[in-house]
Amino acid sequence: MAKRPTLTTDSGMPVADNQNSITAGPRGPVLMQDFHLLEKLAHQNRERIPERTVHAKGSAAYGTLTITHDISKYTKAKVLQKGKKTEAFLRFSTVAGERGAADAERDVRGFALRFYTEEGNWDLVGNNTPVFFVRDALKFPDFIHTQKRHPKTNMRSPTAMWDFWSLSPESLHQVTILMSDRGLPQSYRNIDGFGSHTYSFINARGERHWVKFHFKTQQGIKNWTNAEAAQKVAYDRETHQRDLFEAIEKGNFPKWKFSVQIMPESDVDKHWYNPFDLTKVWPHKDYPLIEVGTLELNRNPKNYFAEVEQAALAPSNIVPGIGHSPDKMLQARIFSYADAHRYRVGVNAHQLPVNRPRVEANDYHADGTMRLEGKPYPDAFYEPNSFNGPLEDQSYRDPPLKIMGDAARYNHRDGNDDYRQPGELFRLMRPDQKEQLFNNYKAAMEGVPVEIVTRQIVHCYRADPEYGLGVAKALGIDFKPQTIAAE
Ligand code: HEM
């Protein structure tokens, strides 16, 4: 048998006894000089960092993005050129539950991708749904409060959730997905991933196209009913973590087909919907999926805390050839994630192995907690300088983005049709899926005051009368459509 390594303290000193503290006599009190004991206790007190305020429970793996198709006419991003293979990291998550929550809950799933490209990290922090509950970031903290625990009861509150949703008609599209069979996936391998927002592609000629990113599971979509999930949770709270980890350990590598939808820059005003509205999809008949490549997950992290808990992914991490868009939710996310990382992990979170780009990061930031290393240019610690420090490169400049309008707080609900796409989605469902949707509403609305339930049914009815009447029937509500017709 190989010789086992000697146990040491944090400073590397060999430890002679890891079983008995130093005491004054065999029964005696402990001596302050037992720094090995003090180090162990002190370290244990600092083992936790703040969990993510949302998406706290998650699982992740590394893999490879392979580009199989030529989309160079849309983007110059090196990571997206035909034949390119790039190391990837994908963290899946549930949204509402805390770090110890059960996996098999009805919830949206996070699909947070990182690509370690030769031009820096590109993070595409998306979900398993193409839309979201709100369209203005000003409402994000309010929405998330309804998903978390009630401040007095310390329990989740269906009343708060449905109160907020029923007062926010723009949420209906996402709520319809959440209450459908897709709201409770069997595993992370059985979900699709979406960038959700509109982003931009910039090609070598400096032309911009709008783009949406899609990842289609090759394992098939598989969901559980509420009853099936309850059975699972009773025996195993880690169903998704177990499934992903074990599949990869066995060499059964999950795959997703990677596609994009592309919209010419000048098309933005051509539609009844705003292409930058995160509560809307772009119809595939107008903007069909263009195949780009495949994503495979093939390596488990070695240490969950170091690599998954400390992973710091941010929509602000983009690379040349990929840009943001005027989507106001995305604009807010550009701020929010890096800010969360400074608080949750620290100002130098980007130096940790899971976050470090695979290329040299040449910034002029200095110091801060837990800085791991200095810079390769010791005399060039400010800019401009005469000591061969890194320089900006104008060739990476993006084409200008036309922005117009007076600064004001515009009512995003004015003239916005929040019912058309949820209605279309409802009409795509098979009869058994519609039945499941109605029953999931019933289960999710237990104990919610009738006026809130009725307010929500009005939204469902406006999307499609059969939708509203189906939910009302499942809940045993005597819903009178003529009352809303009169409104
Ligand atoms: C996590 C904010 C909307 C997907 C987070 C975190 C914050 C945040 C602060 C924790 C980050 C961390 O501590 O590492 C926001 C804000 C939003 C918003 C302010 C709206 C204005 C969205 C949307 C999506 C999304 C629209 C999907 C399309 C995720 C995912 C994670 C996350 C997947 C987990 C990231 C990971 O696995 O590390 N969000 N979010 N969020 N958010 Fe959002």
Image (spheres, grey):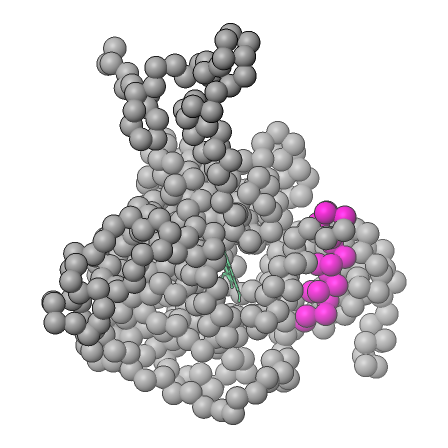
Q: Position of residue 30 (x, y in %)?
A: 51, 19
Q: Residue at x 68, y 58 (%)?
A: 146
Q: Position of residue 155 (x, y in %)?
A: 72, 47
Name the quarter where the N terminus is drawn.
top left
User: From where the camera sits, is residue 452 visible?
Assistant: yes
**Foreground pick, 245 / 177:** 245
Q: Residue at x 48, y 75 (%)?
A: 327
Rendered image quadrant of residue 462: bottom right
Q: Please provide the residue range marked out in magenta.
A: 153-169
Rendered image quadrant of residue 70: bottom left
User: From where the camera sits, is residue 312 visible?
Assistant: no
Q: Is residue 445 left or right of residue 110?
A: right
Q: Position of residue 69 (x, y in %)?
A: 25, 62
Q: Position of residue 264 (x, y in %)?
A: 36, 80
Name the quarter where the C terminus is drawn.
bottom right
Q: Is residue 158 left or right of residue 206?
A: right
